[in-house]
Image (cartoon, helix red, strand yellow):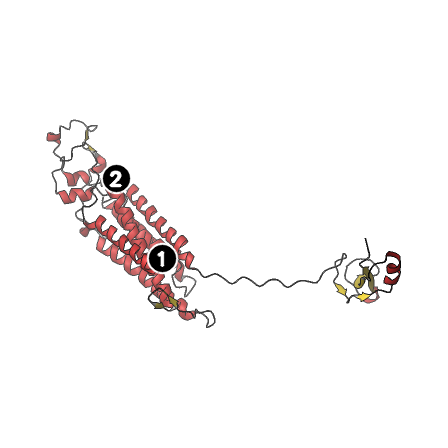
Amino acid sequence: MFYFQLVIMAGTVLLAYYFEYTDTFPVHIQGFFCYDKTFSKPYPGPDDTSKIPPVLIYSLVTAIPTLTILIGELCAFFTKAEGTQEKTIVTADCCYFNPLLRRIIRFLGVYAFGLFTTTIFANAGQVVTGNQTPHFLSACRPNYTALGCQSTMQYITERRACTGNPLIVMSARKSFPSKDAALSVYSAVYTVVSEVIPTCTRLTKPTISLTLLCLAMLVGVVRVAEYRNHWADVLAGFFTGAAIAVFLVTCVINNFQQLQPSPPLPRPQRPESVLGMPMVTLPCVESPLEKLSGERHFLTPKLCCFTHVLVNRDLGSHLPIRGESAVWLTHLRCNLPA
């Protein structure tokens, strides 16, 4: 099982690499309308010149959850009571892990898997749809005269319609969904939902959670403000990242929860009489009436039980009993023949 998980992780990393840095999966070429104002925003420059460049986003989505998981697990491990700490050492076919290391590897491993999965989903959506960015026409630089554009309703489908830098044009065709928005929201939602944030005080967890979510939303706002993505692209990226994070935490992380011991069975209570008062049951004794019963019915001796009930002599109910109103009633219960 451990080696199988390593194979899945390696395959996920390789697939993300092929989507990101190779031309193994070609981008779908979509056409455009002449002079379309939706794609005529000014070119903002390469992604490295953005206010939130991809290098900064990748560094934050890697460093912040990792540090949060490490600090949270260390605080939880050392603040637990002595009797509640796990004592077992778990094996993984070839390795031995103590409980603290096992939990850290679990959370970080699942988080890394989800990070590459989010990248794959975002890149796959961009390759399959081929939606253009708001600055597509500025990067494409089409020759409207050679294309014969005479009205804004004319649709251009030629693959060689663009005269700009092919790399910039290809990048401008990858807009839906926004990968940066998906990664930032995945990182924030996973950290918040997986409950790895240390709870030193009552305001620690809410403050960290809101900060992470606000930073993720800020990434999407910057992408739209710089004309690198449409609002629909950012919202689709938010949904993709949040869905993957919730799925991993719900279906993967929660499956590692240890089974809680079953609660002890309730102790049997004393039976109560019809009047609602506690009954005092005496040991069963042999009844002298059994002789008559035996002579008449030729049956074996039966057992009778005397039951004493404390009742209110005046009212005949289970109301509060005081003074001489208390009286014991004796009931004779025998197993007589039917």
Circle 1 SS class: helix
Residue under the point 19% across and 44% down: 171
Q: Is residue 83 visible?
A: yes
Image quadrant for the N terminus? bottom left
Mark in front: 1 vs 2? 2
| Residue 33 picture quarter | top left
x and y percentages locating residue 46 in the rendered image: 17, 48
Please name the residue shown 19% across and 50% down the image. 21
Mark 1 to mark 2 CA distance (whole Å):
30 Å
Q: Which residue is under mark 1?
A: 191
Task: Using the image, tell me which numbered label, if any, was put on residue 3.
Answer: none
Type of the residue with mark 2: Thr
Q: Earlier in the sequence, mark 1 or mark 2?
A: 2
329 lies above or below 181: below
Asked whether residue 221 is in view, the answer is no
The residue located at (37%, 53%) in the rendering is 248
Instruction: Say what amino acid the circle numbered 1 marks.
Output: Thr
Badge 1 crowding class, 10 Å Cα cut-off, few under 14, some 14 to 19, many 20 or more, is: many
**Against 239, is 311 above or below?**
below
Left or right, 160 with respect to 269, comes to left
Give the residue at the far top of this rendering: 150
Residue 275 spot, x, y in % from top left: 77, 57
Residue at the farthest front position = 298
